[in-house]
Amino acid sequence: MAITALYLTIVPHALAVAAAVMVLVWCIHFRGGLAWASSNKNLIFNLHPVLMLIGFIILGGEAIMSYKSLPLSKDVKKLIHLVLHGIALILGIIGIYTAFKYHNESSIVNLYSLHSWLGMGIIVLYGIQWIYGFLVFFYPGGSAGLRSESLPWHVLLGLFVYILAIGNASIGFLEKLTFLENSGLAKYGAEAYLVNFTAVVTILYGAFVIFTVFAKAPSEDDNSYSAI
């Protein structure tokens, strides 16, 4: 018996809450808090994982799941899908900016790591995907033929970019934890375990977001990605 997407989303919703709490505990309790401007530049950096995980990864995942799982009309779900992705994109851009801000104010060079290279590529592809989706599927809207031809590529590219984002988030957790451990953080301490488990929960969340896309929609004729 096929599992309905609406019920399957219970798992990623729970994982999203867990991941959000974990990254906030890490950045606020263990790393000292969050700040847009501070003499302690590490507080500026702390905004980066919070915005990228909660704002970009989690909201982006919710946007993907919303179109497949919500038992609403096509037009309403399309708007929710569009708005959530738009918010995720904006918060992702701000999150990347905070990393640049931290580097610049700490006299650290930018774009020297694989994590940063992938991050820039992902946010650009995400932006292109959002703009194209807006123009073709929302306003002014393409012809029926263009929408039909674009849909498989829209879904495929969206999932590809999202999987890249999940993988890059994991690289980011690893990179930061490695820096901290090289600076004296205990490898088997509470903070190290928290960071690693946050990465694991993030990966599981992303996996269940993908599973939801392939689950049974509430109504295949009106509530699935085939109805965009």
Image (cartoon, rainbow, N blue to C red):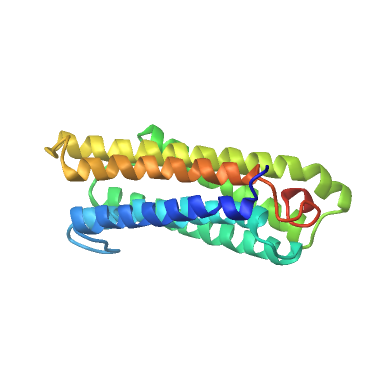
Judging depth in this view, the residue of 12 and 62 nearest the camera is 12
Q: Residue 55, image x and y in percent?
A: 45, 57
Residue 192 relative to residue 215: left or right: left
User: Is residue 31 or residue 68 the one in the foreground?
Assistant: 68
- Residue at image point 72% right, 40% down: 153
Image position of 175 with respect to 134: above or below: above
- Residue 97 visible in the snapshot: no
Using the rendered view, name the quadrant where residue 173 is placed.
top left
Q: Is residue 210 left or right of residue 52?
A: right
Image position, residue 93 (x, y; %): 47, 54
Q: Nearer the viewer, residue 47 or 110?
A: 47
Q: Is residue 9 left or right of residue 131?
A: left
Quarter occupied by the C terminus: bottom right
Q: Quadrant of residue 80?
A: bottom right
Which of the image's four quarters has the N terminus? top right
Q: Position of residue 100 (x, y in %)?
A: 35, 50
- Residue 18 drawn at (x, y percent): 37, 54
Residue 103 in sight here: yes
